[in-house]
Amino acid sequence: MAIEIKVGDRIAWVDLRGQDGNLLEIEVDGKILKVDVMHTADGTFSILESGHSYNIELVPRDQPKKYTAYTLYHEFEVEIIDAEARYLIDRGAKGFVSAEKNISSAMPGKVVKVLVSEGESVTEGQPAVIISAMKMESEYKIPLNGKVKKVNVKDGDTIEGNQILIELE
């Protein structure tokens, strides 16, 4: 599944063609690359490609799938535009929230961390849950001021697409 990655003013089409552990075969704008990618404990990515080594730190910004990428000498604004982000962009939405005030995942993944608990008063924009899908972490935020009615997942759970994660009153 190809995704768009916007780096500054440039948009690249990236497709994961194959993977064997840390070794990836990716297609970037029609060019096939074989890379070795390691995600370190401190959040830095170590990338080896054609004998060159790159270290990149991705720092999440105030919106899901938007990051500031730091290399040794440069800083870039990065946005991941995958199926979930494209859905949000196309609909001008802030998040996946139904009329019943539920927070749902747009795609299958794994719960990294639940950040709210049942009965907790929450405010719009407050981080609620972090989901890992397609090797990317997405932070789902509270869509409006209110109270958490029910938390349907816990850290480490595997989830399906469109599964209700958190219900709000």
Image: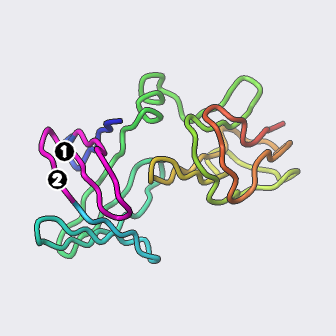
Q: Which residues are magenta?
A: 13-34
Q: Residue at x 54, y 35 (%)?
A: 94
Badge 1 amino acid:
Val
- Assign the C terminus to one quadrant of the image: top right
Which mark, by number, is residue 28? 1
Under tag 2, what secondary structure? strand
Front residue of this view, candidates 23 and 87: 23
Residue tagged by mark 2? 33
Badge 2 amino acid:
Leu
Front residue of this view, candidates 99 and 24: 24
Q: Marks 2 and 1, how far apart in space?
A: 7 Å
Q: Residue at x 21, y 42 (%)?
A: 12
For residue 79, above or below residue 39: above
For residue 18, above or below residue 144: below
> Residue 22 at what x, y percent from top left?
35, 64
> Residue 143 at what x, y percent from top left?
65, 38
Mark 2 or 1 closer to N-term? 1
